[in-house]
C-alpha cells in the first residue's frame, strides 16, 4: 500500500486580539499547518521530488529541515535538552535536505509532528522574556520571544519554497 501524506484539519481561528504569547503560538501553528498542508495528499515519492531545477530541495527535505529547526531552537537552544540530531550525515552533507532519496517519508512526517508537540511542551509555561545563554548571540543571550520569532521566520521562508515545489509537482496552489 502506498503511503499518502495525511490532510491537516484547520482549527477555528484564534482570537487575533489576544496577548503576545497567544499570537506567537497562533502564527507558529499557522506556519506549521501550512507546511503540512503543502505535503497533504502526496505520495512518499512525490515528497522526495526535487521539482525546481537545479535545486535539490524537496518537500520531504523541508519537513526534515523544520524538524531540525523545531528541535534545535525550542528543545536544545532554549530548553537545554540534548535529544540528538534526527538526521545525522557526514561532513559537508546536510542530512535533512540531501539524504531524502531513501528516506522514510511516513516516519519523517511523524517525526515532525512529534517534534512539534515536544517543542511546545519544552517551552510551556516559560516566560517570553526569560533569557538563556547563547554564545553566538551578540549579547550572549536569547529569550523565548526571539526563539518563537526565529522559528516563525524559518517556516515563512521555507513555506515559500514549499509553494513552488508543490505547484511544480501537481499544480496545486494556495492554502
Image: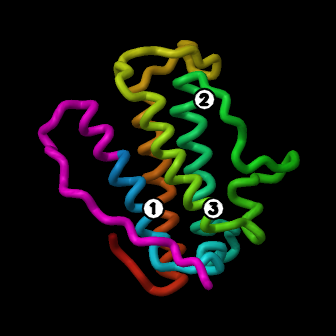
Give whichever of discs 3 and 1 has the lower sequence position. Answer: 1
Identify the residue under disc 1. Answer: 35
Res 130 → quadrant = top left
Q: Tell me if 170 is positioned left or right of 54 in this view.
A: left
Which segment did they paint magenta? 1-27
Q: Count neighbours of disc 3 (C-alpha within 10 A) and say few if under 14, some if 14 to 19, many if 20 or more.
A: few
CA distance for labels 1 and 2:
22 Å
Give whichever of discs 2 and 3 has the lower sequence position. Answer: 2
Res 100 → quadrant = bottom right
Q: Quadrant of the N terminus?
A: bottom right
CA distance for labels 3 and 1:
16 Å
Identify the residue under disc 3. Answer: 107
Identify the residue under disc 2. Answer: 76
Mark whose residue sits in front, 3 or 1: 3
Give whichever of discs 1 and 2 has the lower sequence position. Answer: 1
Q: In percent of the image, x 75 and y 53: which residue is there?
A: 95
Whether residue 14 appears in magenta in the rendering, the answer is yes
Q: Tell me if 154 is positioned left or right of 173 in this view.
A: right
Q: Give me the disc on residue 77.
A: none
Instruction: State the image coordinates of residue 98 (x, y, percent, origin top left).
Output: 75, 61
Q: Mark 2 and 3 residues: CB-CB less than 8 Å, in contact?
A: no
Instruction: State the image coordinates of residue 16 (x, y, percent, origin top left).
Output: 15, 44
Q: In percent of the image, x 50 and y 53: which residue is there?
A: 113
User: Total label count?
Assistant: 3
Task: Tell me the SS state at disc 2.
Answer: helix
Q: In percent of the image, x 60 and y 67: which residue is there?
A: 106
Instruction: State the image coordinates of residue 68 (x, y, percent, origin top left).
Output: 62, 45
Q: Count neighbours of disc 2 (C-alpha within 10 A) and say few if under 14, some if 14 to 19, many if 20 or more.
A: some
In the foreground, 38 or 115: 115
Q: Name the residue at the front extreme.
A: 1
CA distance for labels 2 and 3:
22 Å
Amino acid at each position: 500500500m502506498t503511503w499518502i501524506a495525511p490532510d491537516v484539519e484547520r482549527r477555528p481561528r484564534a482570537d487575533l486580539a489576544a496577548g503576545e504569547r497567544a499570537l506567537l503560538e497562533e502564527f507558529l501553528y499557522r506556519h506549521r499547518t501550512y507546511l503540512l498542508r503543502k505535503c497533504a495528499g502526496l505520495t512518499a515519492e512525490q515528497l522526495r521530488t526535487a521539482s525546481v531545477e537545479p535545486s535539490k530541495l524537496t518537500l520531504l527535505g523541508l519537513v526534515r529541515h523544520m524538524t531540525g529547526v523545531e528541535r534545535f531552537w525550542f528543545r536544545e537552544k532554549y530548553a537545554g535538552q540534548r535529544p540528538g540530531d534526527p538526521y545525522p550525515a557526514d561532513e559537508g552533507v546536510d542530512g535533512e535536505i540531501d539524504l531524502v532519496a531513501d528516506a522514510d517519508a511516513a516516519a519523517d512526517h511523524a517525526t515532525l509532528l512529534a517534534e512539534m508537540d515536544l517543542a511546545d511542551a519544552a517551552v510551556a509555561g516559560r516566560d517570553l522574556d526569560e533569557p538563556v545563554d547563547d554564545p553566538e548571540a551578540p549579547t550572549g543571550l536569547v529569550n523565548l520571544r526571539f526563539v518563537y520569532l526565529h522559528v516563525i521566520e524559518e517556516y515563512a521562508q521555507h513555506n515559500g519554497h514549499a509553494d513552488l515545489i508543490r505547484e511544480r509537482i501537481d499544480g496545486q496552489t494556495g492554502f
